[in-house]
Structures are given as structure tokens and as C-alpha cells.
């Protein structure tokens, strides 16, 4: 992995492909790399991690992790079910 830009470009393509594979075919919708955006990113030593989402209204977000030792990228796909405010006062 050359650097952050290369990692994030790969992540956007991976998320685009995953989302398109799981879209309902009857929606007749395909997203592009421009529909994928980075929410958060971090690099530590040889490793990278990014949280991404898409412009789709499906509540999904994605975590891409690069293991620098094995030169592998792992994709986790999550569905947001709820967002609650918990008052701790």
C-alpha cells in the first residue's frame, strides 16, 4: 500500500461494489464511486482504517481495515438501527 489516498480509493471502490451487489434489483439503481464518502480515517504504522457511507438512504455504513502485515483489506458492513440520546445528568 503506497499511502492514504490509494487506500481510500480502494475502499470507495470496495464499498461501491458491495452496495451495488446488495441493492434491490427492482430499484434499477447503481451507485458510483462519487456516491461513497469517507466519514473517518486513521493510519497507524502499516495499518489503515476508514469508516465510509454512501448517499443511499439505507442506513448502512462500512468499515475498511488494511492489515499491513498481511497486505489484506477487510470489509465490515453495518446497518444502523437506532440513534438514541441518553441523558446522563
Image (cartoon, rainbow, N blue to C red):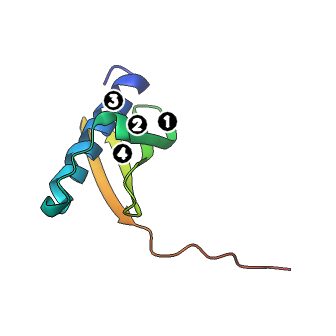
User: Is 50 drawn above or below residue 2 in the view shown?
Assistant: below
Badge 4 element: strand
Closer mark to the observer between disc 4 and disc 1: 4
Q: Which residue is mark 4?
A: 65
Q: In whole angstroms, how far apart are the C-alphas of marks 4 and 2?
A: 7 Å
Q: Which residue is mark 1?
A: 44
| Residue 16 drawn at (x, y percent) | 26, 43
Closer mark to the observer between disc 1 and disc 3: 3
Q: Which residue is mark 3?
A: 9
Are the two marked residues, 2 and 1, in contact with CB atoms closer than 8 angstroms? Answer: yes
Give the quarter of the figure containing the C terminus: bottom right
| Residue 85 drawn at (x, y percent) | 69, 75
Task: First in sequence, mark 4 or 1: give its number.
Answer: 1
Q: Which residue is mark 2?
A: 47
User: Which residue is drawn at the image coordinates 41% and 64% (left, top)?
Assistant: 59
Q: In whole angstroms, how far apart are the C-alphas of marks 4 and 3?
A: 13 Å
Task: First in sequence, mark 4 or 3: give its number.
Answer: 3
Horizontally, is 39 left or right of 55 in the view? right
Horizontally, is 37 left or right of 69 in the view? right
Closer mark to the observer between disc 4 and disc 3: 3
User: Which residue is drawn at the image coordinates 46% and 40% (left, top)?
Assistant: 38
Quarter location, residue 88: bottom right
Quarter location, residue 65: top left
User: Which residue is drawn at the image coordinates 32% and 59% (left, top)?
Assistant: 77
Q: In whole angstroms, how far apart are the C-alphas of marks 1 and 3?
A: 18 Å
Are the two marked residues, 4 and 2, in contact with CB atoms closer than 8 angstroms? Answer: yes
Task: First in sequence, mark 2 or 3: give its number.
Answer: 3
Amino acid at each position: 500500500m503506497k499511502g492514504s489516498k490509494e487506500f481510500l480509493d480502494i475502499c470507495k471502490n470496495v464499498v461501491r461494489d458491495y452496495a451495488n451487489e446488495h441493492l434491490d434489483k427492482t430499484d434499477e439503481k447503481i451507485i458510483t464511486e462519487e456516491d461513497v464518502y469517507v466519514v473517518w480515517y486513521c493510519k497507524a504504522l502499516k495499518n489503515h482504517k476508514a469508516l465510509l457511507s454512501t448517499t443511499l438512504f439505507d442506513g448502512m455504513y462500512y468499515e475498511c481495515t488494511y492489515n499491513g502485515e498481511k497486505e489484506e483489506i477487510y470489509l465490515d458492513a453495518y446497518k444502523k438501527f437506532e440513534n438514541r440520546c441518553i441523558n446522563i445528568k
